[in-house]
Image (tube, grey):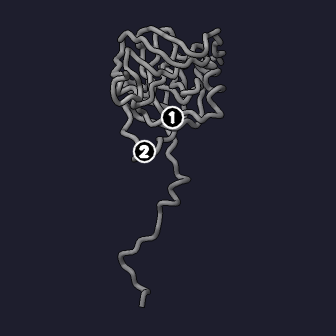
Amino acid sequence: MGKHKPHEKPREHHAKVAEVDVEILNGIIQHYNFSPKGGVEGLLLQDGDRTVQVNVPPEAWVAIASAAVVGQAVQVSVIPEPESGKHPRGEHPVYRFISLQPASGPRSPGNGSVVEGDVKVEGIVSRFNYAKHGEANGVVLQNGDFLHLKPDGMKQAGLSLGESVAAQGTARPMLLGHRVIEAEVVNGVELGSKQPHH
């Protein structure tokens, strides 16, 4: 009794953890994705006719950003980023960084002198910045400053590429130069506020 269980199959899922499919992407770095603290969380790579996002581990981003700049051709080894049920599907394929080989010599990140603290900024949206799961969480202005809005703030502000922005928030310097601005008000909209502020 109990010897014959025809519907039971041996478990195989644990063996596949080690069998990760490493892919090699060859492309040009379009942008870096900035973290809310002003570091780099990943990069957007133009790989043929598609844009892909490569998330970078916290301990590696300084070396990566020093080795390759925007516009540089690189070869990146990656694995697919596991999908999360907690977040909506990203706007492009998302991978996890394994290693990077720049096509030309290493470059140094810039260091600009920037204003910190409470600031008011105006500019034009040049691109979107993406969180690790591929959802837009802010915008980068034409002057290089990063307005961090979080995904909910992006929905509230409703910004589009090429749009003029006037924002208020707290600024901190980024290691690659420019500033990250924790936006509180964007084009008159108070982020996080469910109703108009009185």
The tag on residue 24 is 1
Indicate whether 123 appears above or below 97: above
Q: Which residue is mark 2?
A: 83
Indicate the quadrant where residue 113 lies: top right
Q: Which quarter of the figure has residue 114?
A: top right
Q: Nearer the viewer, mark 2 or mark 1?
A: 2
Query: Which part of the image, by quadrant, shows the N terminus?
Result: bottom left
Counting other residues with Cα less than 10 Å from the Cα at mark 1, is it few (<14), some (14-19), or many (20 or more)? some
Circle 1 — which element?
strand
**Furthest-front residue in view?**
198
The residue most toward the bottom is 1
- Identified at 50% across, 8% down, the residue is 143
Instruction: Give the percent coordinates (x, y) of residue 140.
Output: 47, 17
Nearer to me, 167 or 146: 167
- Point out the image quarter for the C terminus: top left
Residue 29 visible? The answer is no
**194, 123: nearer the viewer:** 194
For label 2, count other residues whose C-alpha is less than 10 Å away and answer few (under 14), some (14-19) or many (20+): few
Q: Amino acid at mark 2?
A: Glu
**Residue 32 percent location from the top left of the image:** 52, 23
Give the alpha-carbon distance from disc 2 to disc 1, as whole Å: 20 Å
- Between 194 and 182, the one lying in front of the other is 194
Q: Earlier in the sequence, mark 2 or mark 1?
A: 1
Q: How many marks?
A: 2
- Residue 34: give its label: none
100 or 63: nearer the viewer: 63
Residue type (three-letter) at the residue carrying disc 1: Ile
Residue 85 appears in the figure: yes
Image location (x, y in percent) of residue 185: 43, 19
Disc 2 to disc 1: CB gap under 8 Å: no
Residue at 55% from the left image edge and 19% from the top image edge: 170
Residue 41 sits in which quadrant?
top right
